Amino acid sequence: MPSLTSRLSLRTILLLNVVGYGLMAWWFPLGSNVALSPPADIRTFAPTLPAGIAYAALLVAQFGLLVMAFRRAEREDAGARPLLFVLAGGLLLALPLLWAYPVNATDIFGYVIRGRIASAYGESPFSSPAAAFVGDPFMPLVGEWAGLTTPYGPLWELLAAGLTAISGDNLLLGVLLFKGLALAAFLATAVLIWRLLPAGASRVAYTLLWAWNPGLLMTFILNGHNDAVMIFWLMLGFWVARRGWPTGGFLVMVLAALTKPVALLALPFFFIGQWRDLPDGRARARFVGLVVAGSALLAWLAFLPWAGEGGSLRAPLDLALRLVSEATGGAGFSPAVWVYMVLGRRVSIETIGTVTQVLFVSFALWLVWLGLRGRESLRGAADIFFGYLAGALNFRIWYAVWPFPWLLLDAGRASADAERAAYRLRVGLWFLLLAQLSVVIYGHIRVFVLSGDQAVAHLLGVPIVFGLPWLLALLPLRLSRPLHDA
């Protein structure tokens, strides 16, 4: 008896996906809610337990359709122009989400307001927090971040200033422009993934696994997160390096760190991989010299527009202090807090945070050592991102996208260890799904089932999000069968 996957065509699966995202646009309308203060979240639009369960079911259905599309794409002809078909499908899926409210991450309002600090007030977001502009009509939308300066890089803030110069006092237009930027970066990354994958039946399927992925569409388009731009720069640099220009490729990757500094975590692994592939010591020395000089020049140029009374070093110093504060201050939904709860709060969260930081540094050094010994840079990049988000005091659901493109490329390319790469990709896919579902666990389940008990919600949610993907990827279920058919 034919399976459901074999009965539904790719176009039918795509249409069902579009209907799902259309429901989200209807359920979470952006236009009528864009100025809500304080900003809304999923429980604003799904205020009851049945509504939360319905939202979770919709997410699960969208991920199920993605896996069906992946399997179908390996068996069905995508037409004479398969890349265009995949990109058109991704665009079609994204269009409803452009008009949906960012229910799981309202950072996009911060992008607009910090962009206005430069474009409307002529100040620097590296030295002036949003709270300094009490007369701005949009300032209350920043929420808990109002008293803090920007945590993003100078290149991102230049982009934000440019977009808000266009949108002016039109908040809806500003939000749509940032979503549009994320969409452009998302689809451009799909093109790069296509070009980096080997030709063959699986090429369409693996590119589709990026372009039609609910976890990515929810993060980049629904929520408009700037991680799409960061990942685009990293992917573009990787492609340029693979085209035979390792120095130029690495310098493009530096733009990712100047967009969002967390990209710095991946740079050593791509540096080592490109350095290792050079033919001799002279070429390697030239590569190191050009990369160091070029990176310093790019950083200076990116920070130059933000040089104020404190000189050219003021903005980088302000950003560094802001990032240190964010990395060491406060604690939320995270494995570190889970350990704190399990230990009955007898060990301070500061001590646990210090231990996790030491473990992360040790893990990073081990990954660097493996890279020097020849391990693929794609695996190093995926692992360092996962190591960081597993050890962070605060985990946020968009962190889950950071390892995924590198897991995807590793599994999609011909590999001597294809089975392990496929397993790692399945873990990444489950992680994307469960990270999205964490808002229901920590929101609806906590409020309606656990009587609002945050401690129990942590004890339940953290193992589900961080542990369950590794187990689910082992199960002989259709969703967890190897995605790589070598």
Image: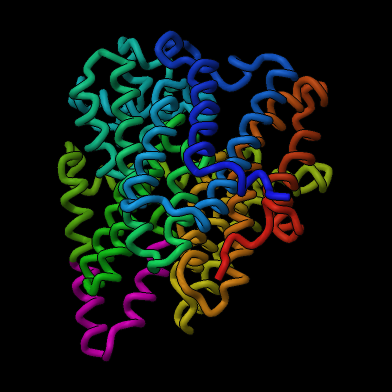
Image side of residue 154 versus residue 322, left or right = left
Q: Residue at x 39, y 68 (%)?
A: 198
Of residue 333 and residue 105, the one placed in the foreground of this image is: 105
Front one among 322 and 394:
394
Q: Is residue 271 above or below residue 442?
A: below
| Residue under the image location 59 percent in, 60 percent down | 483
Q: Looking at this rendering, what residue extends furthest in the front direction?
A: 1
Direction from residue 366 to residue 29 in the image, left or right: left
**The magenta segment:** 266-293
Give percent across and percent down for residue 143: 48, 21
Q: Residue 407: x, y in percent? A: 51, 61
Please give the name of the residue rendered at 45% of the width and 50% of the height, measured from the top-left corner: 208
The quarter in which the C terminus is drawn is bottom right
Residue 317 seen from this side? no
Q: Main secondary structure of the magenta part?
A: helix
Percent across and percent down for residue 40 are 53, 17
Depicted 432 relative to depicted 281: above or below:
above
Please say which color scheme the image uses: rainbow
